Every structure is written in structure tokens, then in C-alpha cells.
Amino acid sequence: MKNTFLVIPWLVMMLLFSQGAWSAEEKIQLFMADGQLKSHPLRLFVTRDIDESMSPRLMLTGSHAITQKNAAEDQLIAPMLIAQNQKSEQTINDTQVTLTGTLLLFDLRHYPIPAYKTVMRLTPTLTWQEGSGMGSKKVAIGAHEVYLANPVPAFILPFTMVVLLILLIAFMAKRSHKSAIQFICDKEGHLSLARTQVALWTVAIGSLVTAYGFMRLEVPQIPSSLVALMGLSLATGAISYTQSEKNKDASSAAHAGVNPSSNSLHKTALADLVMDYSESPAGSLSLARAQMVLWTALTLLLFIVKSILDGNLWAVPWELVALMGLSQVGYLAPKINLKADI
């Protein structure tokens, strides 16, 4: 009986030890972010210490229900860089956890994705050697399939769709016997700087959100600074329109007996963006409007280029958002007639 009581604790300890070892084996996980561009170094994280002597190799397995499989898809890809003891935040069962492991970078510029495909659905598999003999080859398979994006068609297709939608809107305007340019003009036919800015930001953000949506088949995360910048542009447009209408009503009341022929529509021109027509019909150059044109053009250019090169929507720095806000305040200031409001 005494021997039995001695054996039971020993069995319990062995059972716990074996379960712990089994759990340690199960904890090897592989993570590959969805929607990565093959033109960028592909990032892969595995919860295991792996070095170059272990000969890690990546294989990306795709599905081919219709298209023919390319023989190059079965190639084992060696990493271009291995970084051990790295920390990575991952979402597991809707919980954000920090894991420690190895980060591997791969060059997939020559991975065979057909030119007509924007993305390819793949299952990542990483193999490596630990020691020698049977069981030395280790394998980690991604928990789910991921999309690898083909950069050229991935950006061309969404921008083409946006252009087609713009043409459709222009066609609908023409069917109503109006010109599409009136969307960004005021009632006198002047090209509105605020409306033009809103239109440009809508096209740029809409195109890139659509592009990254196609790459990952989900709505991409939109930076809060970008939302604030879009809201700032819309608010500027709304205030500009409201104040312009108030000024026009006041001007109409002051010139009630003026010949109506003087109110003929202005011929729209690109120069309207830097002209101030509040003082006289001939207009004058406005430094505040020119400054707003400059900041809008620079920020838009940076946003488009950075978003394409970074492989994600660029979070516009808050300092740049503040500068845009100040330029818009300078644009709105001449429109607000403080004496009339008082």
C-alpha cells in the first residue's frame, strides 16, 4: 500500500510533465500579415528561435480551381534576413498578445503571380532543421490563408474603377443638361477652392482605400489623422459655402437696382483657385488661397506616394494636419465679414 502511495505522485508528475512538453510543441505558431505587396520584403514571424544554420525555407501553396499551377510555386524560398528574439503583437482568439520569436524577411519580387491577378491566396509553410536524424525537420503552417498582392494591377484596377465612376457621374450630369465641372464651382461659375480640395481628397482616399480593400478583401484600417483631415476639408467647404451665400445675399440687397446682365456666369478657369472675387468681379490674387493650394497639393502628393510605397494607408502626421488647418483658417478669414455679423 505504501508503494502505491509513492507511485501515484510520481505518475501525476510525469503526466504533468508530458502535457507541458506537448503544450510547448503546440505553441509553435507562424504568422504572416495579410495583403503584403510582393514588391516589398515579405515579413513572417514564427514563435521559435531559428538561425541561418537551421536552413529555414518558405513555401507558399496556392489553390488552382481554374488556372494552371506554375511549377515555380513549389520552390523553397530562403530568407534574405533572420532576426531572433523579436517581439510581435498578434491577435489570437480576438485577444491581443505579445509573442517572442524570430522575424524572417523574404524577397518575393519574382514569385509567379499572373499579371491579370491583383492578389493570390496562399498558405504559408515554414520548414527548418533542428539537429539531425528522424524528427529533426520541423514544420510550421500558417493558421489561415493570406493574400499576397501583385502591386501593379492592385493599384491600377481600383484607380480605373474610380475613373469610371467619375465618368459615370459626369455622364449623369450631362443627361441633366449640366456640366460636371459645376460640382466644384460656385453659382457664379468660379472654380471653388474648398470644393476642389474636397473632391481631390475624396478621389485619393477612395482610390487607395479601394486598392487595399481588394488586397485584403476587407476594409483597411483608416488612420485617425486621415479622418480628421477629410473632416477638416468638409468643414471648410461647408463654412465657405455658408459664408459666401450670406455675403451674396448682402451684396444683392445693396445692389437691388443693378442691371442683371452684370450677374452673367463667369467662365471657369484654373486661375480661380488663387483668385479672390469678393472685392470686385475682376478679382485679385489671394496669398491665403495660394497657400492653401500649395499645402493641399503637397499633402496629397505625399499621401499618395507614401501610401503606395509603404504598402498601407499613410497616417498623415498631426503636425501636417495642423498646418493644413491653419492654411484653411487663412482661406476662410477674408470670407467672414465681422462687421456685418456684429
Image (cartoon, grey):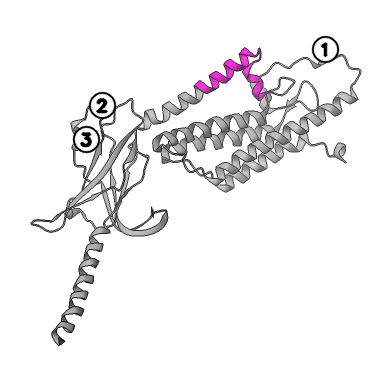
Q: Is residue 80 magenta?
A: no
* Residue underneath mark 1: 261
- For marks 3 and 2, the one nearer the N-term is 2
Q: Badge 2 is on which residue?
A: 67
Q: Residue furthest left?
A: 133
Q: Main secondary structure of the magenta part?
A: helix
Amino acid under disc 2: Thr
Magenta-highlighted residues:
164-185
SS for dot 3: helix
Query: What is the residue that sits farthest to the front in this orientation?
Result: 1
- The residue at which mark 3 appears reads as 73
Residue 192: image tag: none
- From the top left corner, tell me how far across and down residue 30 is, in percent: 29, 51
| Image location of residue 254, percent across then percent down | 90, 25
N-term-proximal mark, 1 vs 2: 2
- The residues bearing labels 1 and 3 have C-alpha atoms spaced at a distance of 72 Å
From the image, state whether disc 1 or disc 2 is nearer to you: 2
Residue 180 forms part of the magenta stretch: yes
Left of 313 or right of it: where is 187? Answer: right
Between 310 and 120, the one nearer to me in the picture: 120
Element under disc 2: loop
Q: Nearer the viewer, mark 1 or mark 3?
A: 3
